[in-house]
Image (tube, rainbow, N blue to C red):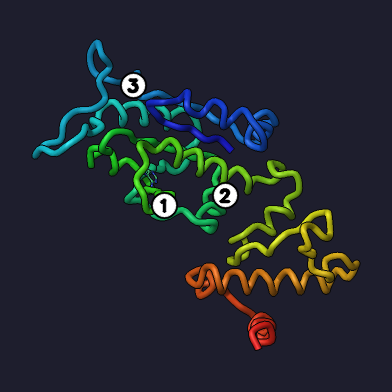
Amino acid sequence: MRIDIVTLLPALFDKVFEESVLGSAVRNGLVEIFLHNFREYGDGRHRTVDDTAFGGGPGMILKPAPLVNCLRDVRRLAAPGPVIGLTPQGLPLNQKLVKELASFDRLILVCGRYEGFDERIISEFDLELSIGDYVLTGGEIAAMTVVDAVSRMIPGTVGRQESVEQDSFYEGLLDHPQYTRPATWEGLEVPAILQEGNHAGIEEFRHCRSLLTTAVSRPDVFSAAELSDHDREALQSLLS
Ligand code: ADE
């Protein structure tokens, strides 16, 4: 997958795309990332990209021409892909959306700064995405979040794809609790069933714990999950 990122702060991304899982995905060519600084398209000697708001108000607004001219050039560099603006007004990112984004061969992510984008920039976006109901100082950390979550969905980026398929939210439920050695630590025991070799029993135990954790911690996620009759019976017996 090719990901183009349009930003005023390309250097912020360096470490994130060099280290760990994302770093190997980039080195192995599974994800290709291109950073574009739209400052280069700014006006005048100072390469100005922002201005005060019409009608008054605090802070500076990103001017349409520098960003849109940069975006138009970036679009032409490769086959088309959705242009996604990172904004707090956007569609909330979730795992379902992450999976959909991972099905594209190319994404173009646009990061804002200051008080936001001039509205005429927003009409250039195919989608606005938010990573949560809070305001960041710019879209860069949101773009890193999108790249990280989407890259994990590309086969080969995470060691074993099964581990992705067992993630929280992958099947619409939170993950079950995990344990490693020692079996007893400070008097706390790992559940006995996990220490025995009964794979079907372990699967069942884990699935029930996923259902329970989701119901208790995230009732909103739980009510959207598609439950089987077997799931409902399992929950009933856990709660009775
Ligand atoms: N830019 C500023 N805040 C943001 C948020 N919550 N999500 C995405 N982009 C943003």
Residues under numbered marks 1 and 2 in contact, where contact means CB atoms less than 8 Å apart = no
Mark 3, Cα crowd under 10 Å, few <14 / some 14-19 / many 20+, is some
Disc 1 C-beta below 8 A from ligand 1: yes
Q: Position of residue 229 (x, y in %)?
A: 65, 85
Disc 3 C-beta below 8 A from ligand 1: no
Of the 4 image quadrants, the one containing the C terminus is bottom right
Q: Amino acid at mark 1?
A: Gly
- Judged by depth in the image, the label closer to the viewer, 1 or 3, is 1
Q: Earlier in the sequence, mark 2 or mark 3?
A: 3
Separation (CA) of disc 1 from disc 2: 22 Å
Numbered circle sitting on residue 40? none
Q: Amino acid at mark 3?
A: Arg
Residue beneath disc 1:
132
Q: Position of residue 38 (x, y in %)?
A: 36, 24
Q: Amino acid at mark 2?
A: Ser
Q: Position of residue 201 (x, y in %)?
A: 82, 74
The picture quadrant for ligand 1 comes to top left
Left or right, 204 with respect to 108, comes to right
Residue beneath disc 2:
103
Of the 4 image quadrants, the one containing the N terminus is top right
Residue beneath disc 3:
39
Q: Secondary structure at mark 1?
A: loop
Query: Residue most toward the bottom?
Result: 240
Q: Residue at x 31, y 31 (%)?
A: 68
Viewer-proximal residue among 131 and 117: 131
Q: Residue at x 56, y 53 (%)?
A: 99
Left or right, 123 with respect to 163, comes to left
